[in-house]
Image (cartoon, helix red, strand yellow):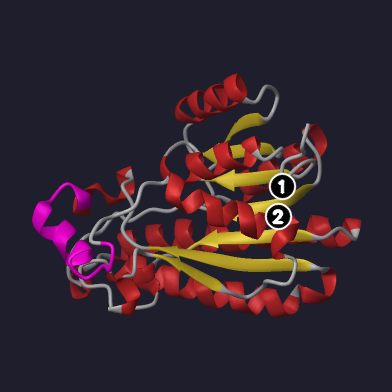
């Protein structure tokens, strides 16, 4: 039987209870990985893990973890090392976008919440996994899910866009600093994807057209359309790729 592209790799996927995270975790398992999926609430995670294990037995574990809480991330990484194995792949997918409106109107509390989850959590998780890999002298891949709104103006999503721009910058810096340890760091910048996080946009025909009219493909994506690039960046096929941000946007940024 032909081995999958991620055979033997242990992977952590944050924000794995639905959407892009669940699609990536499923694709990883199909490629032979052992996947720990994490999110704030265990109930949704357990359903995803159950579905993955029904297809690929013994390949998925669910762990509750708020990525904005350092002690919970520490516990997640330690548990993974002890119970599943050294994580060679980290996907920073957990994200939030609690404020939709003009940038000038955001409250301090919503600003803090967005940065805590989208940026601080991703940095903490990256550092924790990188520390384990460096100590073990093992190669690894850190993948962060950014957004095209981190590369362009983001009207009505300004704070979210700033966190994604910072995530891209973090990816580039970590790629340089961790290269000597053979830890690669890359990002994916999706355009509009049909997830619960984007329902404010996909639930409105007018707002959806702000993206689809400008997109070469004239549509938004499904989560599964993001997972293939994640598999590539997690696998040894991308061994010469680091510090890059890949736009999966249907041509939104070329028009």
Crowding at dot 2, Cα within 10 Å, few <14 / some 14-19 / many 20+, comes out as many
The image shows residue 19 at horizontal and vertical percentages of 41, 42
Q: Is residue 41 magenta?
A: no
Secondary structure of the residue carrying numbered label 2:
loop
Examine the rendered structure and indicate whether residue 94 appears above or below residue 35. Answer: below
Specify whether 111 is left or right of 174. left
140 left or right, relative to 187? right
Q: Which residue is drawn at 31% across and 43% down?
A: 196
Picture coordinates of residue 125 (x, y %)?
63, 56
| Residue 211 is a magenta residue | yes
Q: How far is mark 1 from mark 2, CA to CA?
A: 6 Å
- Is residue 186 toward the left or the right of residue 134 in the image? left
| Front-most of residues 164 and 109 | 164
Q: Quadrant of residue 81?
A: top right
Q: Residue at x 31, y 58 (%)?
A: 192
Label 1 Cα crowd, 10 Å radius (few <14 / some 14-19 / many 20+): some
- For mark 2, what is the residue? 235
- Vertical relation: 145 (above or below) 151: above
Residue 82: give its label: none
The mark nearer the N terminus, 1 or 2, is: 1
Q: Give the range drawn in magenta.
A: 202-217
Q: Where is residue 207 in the image (x, y as percent from the top left)?
A: 14, 59
Q: Mark 1 points at which residue?
A: 5
Q: Toward which corner of the image does residue 143 lie, by quadrant?
A: bottom right
Quarter of the figure that contains the C terminus: bottom left
The answer, for residue 98, to whether it is visible in the render is yes
Residue located farthest toward the left when viewing the structure as drawn: 206
| Quarter that holds the N terminus | top right
Question: Can residue 92 be seen at all in this image of the molecule?
Answer: no
Q: Do the residues labelled 1 and 2 touch (CB within 8 Å)?
A: yes
Image position of 241 (left or right of 54): right
> At which x and y percent is residue 122?
56, 59
């Amino acid at each position: 039987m032909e081995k999958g592209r991620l055979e033997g790799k242990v992977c952590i996927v944050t924000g794995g209870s639905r959407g892009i995270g669940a699609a990536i975790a499923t694709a990883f398992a199909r490629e032979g990985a052992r996947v720990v999926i994490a999110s704030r609430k265990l109930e949704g995670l357990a359903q995803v893990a159950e579905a993955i294990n029904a297809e690929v037995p013994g390949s998925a574990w669910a762990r509750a973890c708020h990525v904005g809480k350092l002690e919970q991330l520490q516990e997640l990484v330690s548990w993974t090392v002890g119970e599943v194995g050294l994580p060679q792949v980290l996907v920073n997918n957990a994200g939030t976008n609690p404020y939709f409106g003009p940038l000038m109107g955001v409250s301090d509390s919503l600003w803090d919440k967005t940065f805590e989850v989208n940026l601080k959590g991703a940095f903490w998780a990256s550092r924790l996994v990188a520390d384990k890999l460096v100590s073990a002298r093992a190669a690894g891949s850190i993948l962060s899910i950014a957004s095209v709104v981190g590369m362009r103006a983001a009207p009505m999503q300004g704070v979210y866009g700033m966190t994604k721009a910072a995530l891209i910058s973090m990816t580039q810096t970590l790629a340089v600093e961790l290269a000597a340890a053979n830890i690669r760091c890359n990002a994916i910048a999706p355009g509009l994807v049909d997830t619960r996080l984007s329902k404010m946009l996909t639930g409105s025909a007018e707002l959806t057209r702000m993206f689809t009219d400008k997109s070469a493909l004239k549509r938004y994506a499904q989560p599964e359309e993001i997972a293939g690039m994640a598999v590539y960046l997690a696998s040894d096929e991308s061994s010469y790729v680091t510090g890059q941000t890949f736009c999966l946007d249907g041509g939104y940024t070329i028009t």
